[in-house]
Image (cartoon, grey):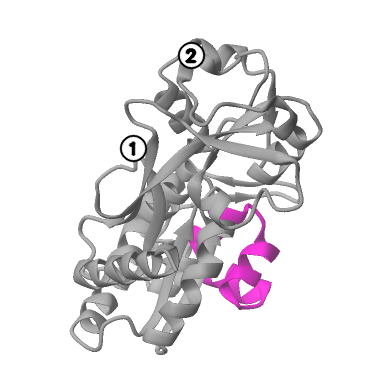
Amino acid sequence: MSVFQPTLKQLQYLVALHDHGHFGKAAEACFVTQSTLSAGLRELESLIGVTLVERTRRVVRFTALGLRVVDKARRVMREAEELGDLVKAEGKPLSGELRLGVIPTIAPFLLPRLLRPVRQDWPELKLFLREETSAAACESLHRGLLDCVLLAFPFGCGDVESEIIFEDRLHVAYPASDNPPANIRPEQIDQERLLLLEDGHCLKDHALSACNRPELRAEARMLGTSLHTLVQMVDNGLGLTILPQMAIDAGILNGTDVVARPLEAAHPTRTIALVWRKASPRGKEFQILANVLRVANERITAPV
């Protein structure tokens, strides 16, 4: 009795079609022609003797079995990739390709300052960066689309290992004309003027948790898509917001009439950490990367 063994290429085509929902886009993602991808999937279905994908002119629809095969294919592809990573990990650390996910409230403020020293110290490391919200980045991590993620805790990212990089202090930003006191206690925050990030950004939850005022979530009068948008709103007198120290250090308030005051609370920080899948054979390498980022951050934030 012959046993059919699907190829990794066929599994890649199947997963890409599921992710993109379109033969042309899936083929482009796999760097093959549409006819090559279609032929590969037809061969896969022919050899296993079942239909995985229902094809119409407008819709690509996976059968129930097709969806189960996609889930299994993701695991097989990830394990195959980790086999390669296992070999790489025995060689020179922090060399070759590494796919790093970063959340939007970290990426524009921290990466420009950290990447230069990392490149200088580890010139053979080829970083591929992907900016996603916390939930999306953690999903990409577990699907094998990312190797590790630069994240802000507390946030539930599943079965991961982590290394803390540093604590990021939270501040309350006001129009300068408000003449706020030197430090701000949570009870001093006017809930009717508070501007927050929209849902999906973990900084919103960190800010509300630090303030320990549940009513602020319901009372926040406007939601922004980015910290830069919130700062512009504050600068135009529309309210006040909460900013992390790294954004202030990166100059987000430059050219504005906005001032920031430290939040004086029991837990006025968020924790910046590097996380990776618990089973990853590159765990030791990621620990080295976390220390590299930690040292680089200490270097750029040290008083002159």
Image coords of residue 76 (percent x, y) = 31, 63
Pointers 2 and 1 in contact (C-beta within 8 Å): no
Residue 187 circle label: 2
Q: CA distance from mark 2 to mark 1?
A: 28 Å
The answer to if 38 sits in the magenta stretch is yes
Residue 114 horizontal side relative to residue 34, left or right:
left
x then y, percent, for residue 215: 51, 10
Residue designated by label 1: 156
SS state under label 2: helix
Count of numbered labels shown in the rendering: 2
Task: Please tell me the numbered disc located at residue 251.
Answer: none
Q: Amino acid at mark 2?
A: Glu
In the image shown, does 296 or 262 lie closer to the viewer? 262
**Residue farthest toward the right in the current orientation of the protein:** 236
Q: Is residue 53 magenta?
A: no
Residue plotted at (39% across, 72% down)? 8
Q: Earlier in the sequence, mark 2 or mark 1?
A: 1
Q: Residue 247's x, y, as percent?
A: 56, 50
Q: Is residue 39 above or below residue 148?
A: below
Position of the C terminus by quadrant: bottom left
| Picture quadrant where residue 98 is located | bottom left
Q: Which residues are magenta?
A: 14-43
Position of residue 228 measured from the top left corner of the image (x, y, whole percent): 69, 46
* Number of other residues with Cα within 10 Å of mark 1, as a class: few under 14, some 14 to 19, many 20 or more: few
- Vertical position of residue 242 compared to residue 293: above or below: above
Classify the position of the N terminus by image quarter: bottom left
Res 43 seen here: no
In terms of depth relative to the viewer, which is nearer, 282 or 227?
227
Residue type at the position of mark 1? Gly
Secondary structure mainly formed by the magenta segment:
helix
